[in-house]
Amino acid sequence: MLAVAAGGYFGYRQLASPGCSGQIELAVAVASELAPAVDTAATEWENEGAVVGGTCIEVNVTASDPVEVAATVAAKHGAVLAGVGQASGTAISPDVWVPDSSAWLLRLKTGGATAFDPGNRASIAYSPVVVGVPEPIATQLGWPESKLTWSGLVGQVNNSKPIKAGTVNPTRDAAGLSGLLALSAAAGAGENGQAATVGALRALSTNSANLRQELLAKFPTSPDSTSVARGLGAAALSEEDVLSYNARKPAVPLVPLYLEPAAMPLDYPYAVLPGIEPAKASAAQMLFEVLATASFKDRLAPLSLRAPDGTWGAGFGAPQGAPSPQVGGASTEPGSGDAAGAVDPVAVDRAVASWSIATQSGRMLCVIDVSGSMKGSVAGAGGASRQQVTLDAARRGLSLFDDSWQIGLWEFSTNLGSGRDYRRLVEIGPLSNQRSRLEQALTQIQPTRGDTGLFDTVLAAYEAVQEEWDPGQVNSIVLFTDGKNDDDNGISQQQLLAELERIKDAERPVQVVLIGIGADVSKAELESITKVTGGGSFVTEDPTKIGDIFLKAIALRKPGA
């Protein structure tokens, strides 16, 4: 029966498309909320005779969680995305991917997939990112008369009687990431901004979830004051999330607040993944043209989605206060090119890393180079030295770690006493007991006249972390240096690698993260170490970037690796 049915369908395709022979199967993975519209449009196109070069086109649309496809694509292209995890063993990379946000494409690129360059990338749908708030709480905030801003929300989250805010894990959810980016920007820079951002991160993490449905279940289910007070009070969601939630007629509907300035929207880019054969690429372009027609807007409307320009089709239930035709400047007209133009890669990496650090725990030894070359000034840093820039990055990173972390601090150069190239400043211990000691030790670090005793220090640090290895934590070393090993009295590179190979233990893994600063660093030297130990090496010739590199490096540590 299946063979007859398949033959009948193929025969219909042949009649619908005279001269059509063979079949091209185009695998299209689409964000779940958009998949029904794409599937319907693709099926109608097939029935009307979808052909490329005389060959029939079969479009297989799969509703897919963007984070699952991102994990698969990352594994294929050698990228590492903080918080995403490993790809499923059965997952297959599609020919065309339509995630909910261009941020996924950007994260893959900055996560190490340097050759990842998908085609097209134009937006085919659009949903503003809003703050979903239970109607009773929205009324208390002045809705619908008052206009709330993101900076106002930061204040609401951090005040003495805070609104109970939550989020879907922003490393795994585009709307959660958009909300975190908006909150971080609103908090501002400097020490006060950093404190406000950390406060917001901690508050959001208390009521976070890995899945959108889990977060939505935290909202109050009864209109009585006790239920409203105990339930979730605010979360960054897409407009589509809120409209779909309210369509189920909950006892307490959500109000979508369109905060100013507008957050990065969900833009649903049409990404033709690299490496597909030319015939499939042609079929993918033809399908895009079907999805870029004006009639596709009306397919989006019943799904509570807008067209790429922010306007909506017949049947769209616009909520009170919904702006039109568009929110912000990140959306594009159909077919106008890359929809990711307004996404700042540095801000995205910083937000993802900050969340990962603030919401996980670990055991880490921080080792800082104090050789003479660290006295060198850094262009663009207001006359600050390499040492000062490095210490500033370490201090800012320390503020993100909560008290569950165990942190220690060493410095190294050559001949720092007792025949050693390193000095133990603070032993690894809980931040709950020694945060002030670490902060004080960082203020006292000064560059010496010595050279760079890298190899002896790495080995000693590895042995120290391994000796008191904690099975409940990711055990790691993070070392900052601005030079190559320069110690005539120390072990050689070959001796170091041989000893690390000998003592490493799969049952007690220690990840080594090496951060090289400036043009004098040998990336090959650093990589030779991390190839043995696990972890990673990061090198920048611009020392002003080490703060962001530090955050990213910590966020990419792999639990259990």
Image (spheres, rainbow, N blue to C red):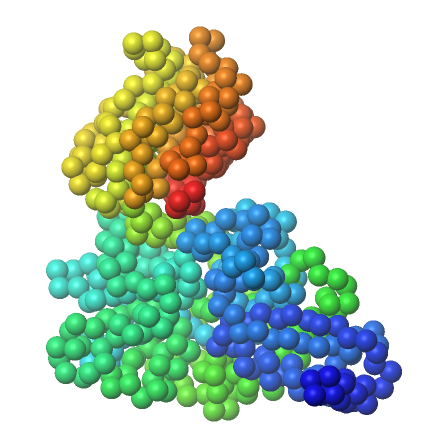
Instruction: Determine whether, in the image, residue 434 is placed left or right of residue 29.
Output: left
Splitting the image into 4 quarters, where does residue 7 fall? bottom right
Which residue is painted at 38% across and 60% down in the image? Answer: 170
Q: Is residue 105 above or below residue 552?
A: below
Quarter of the image containing the N terminus? bottom right
Residue 499 seen in the current view: yes
Who is closer to the viewer here, 33 or 254? 33
* Image coords of residue 103 (percent x, y): 49, 60
Instruction: Determine whether, in the image, residue 534 is placed left or right of residue 202.
Output: right
Splitting the image into 4 quarters, where does residue 152 fall? bottom left
* Image coords of residue 304 (percent x, y): 45, 83
Who is closer to the viewer here, 266 or 454? 454
* Image coords of residue 336 (percent x, y): 62, 69
Q: Residue furthest right?
A: 19
Residue 337 seen in the current view: no
* Image coords of residue 183 (percent x, y): 32, 59
Which residue is painted at 33% across and 55% down in the image? Answer: 184
Which residue is painted at 43% across and 36% down in the image? Answer: 506
Total numbered badges shown on the rendered structure = 0
Quarter of the image containing the C terminus? top left
Splitting the image into 4 quarters, where does residue 282 fall? bottom right
Q: Residue furthest front?
A: 1
Which residue is painted at 24% across and 60% down in the image? Answer: 206
